[in-house]
Image (cartoon, rainbow, N blue to C red):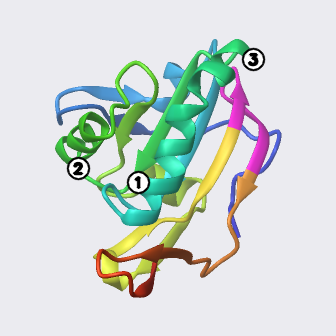
Amino acid sequence: MPRIRIGDSLPNVTLYEDEPDNRIDILNFVANKRAIIFGIPGAFVPGCSRVHLRGFIEKSDDLRYLGFQEIICVSVNDPYVMSAWGSAKAAEDKVRMLADPLATYTRAIGMDIEIPELGGIRSRRYSMATVNGIVRELFVDSPNVKLMCLQQDGVPTYCT
């Protein structure tokens, strides 16, 4: 179960954007903003690319119209991988791609999950709406949820 709940403040944790020298304290970054933050198991993972990130990119204008100043994707990856994934999916100016390389933030909010196929500790899928760093809405996928995907040869498979 997630440790973070509606009404809680985000943790004071450092995330990274584009490169290791570009540190972002997530709580300070959203302290005076309305933000959407969503977590995914990994960059370039088929389900995360085809469904989750794509959905937030496509709905970014609608979310900004509703008053959200930031839309942030967090994953347990390094900042270079998150930056490359954002570029590959045309996320620039729509979704901020923040890396949590040691899963510090992910563990602090209780969204960590062991996924050996992806290298160990990763993030559960979740999304939250925050106002001034306080969680106002929180949605978390059930444990072990898999998305149906199709490989190029048309054989059904499951991807996280």
Q: Magenta stretch: dominant SS?
A: strand
Mark identifier at residue 66: 3
| Secondary structure of the residue carrying numbered label 1 | helix
- Which residues are the magenta region? 129-138
Kindly identify which residue carries mark 1. Answer: 49
Which residue is at the front of the view, 74 or 50? 50
Q: Is residue 116 visible?
A: yes
Asked whether 154 falls inside the magenta stretch, the response is no
Q: Are marks 2 and 3 in contact (CB under 8 Å)?
A: no
Task: Residue type at mark 3: give it.
Answer: Leu
Q: CA distance from mark 2 to mark 3?
A: 31 Å
Residue 2 picture quarter: bottom right
* Amino acid type, mark 2: Asp
Circle 2 residue: 78
Q: CA distance from mark 2 to mark 1?
A: 17 Å
Q: Position of residue 24 (x, y in %)?
A: 37, 27
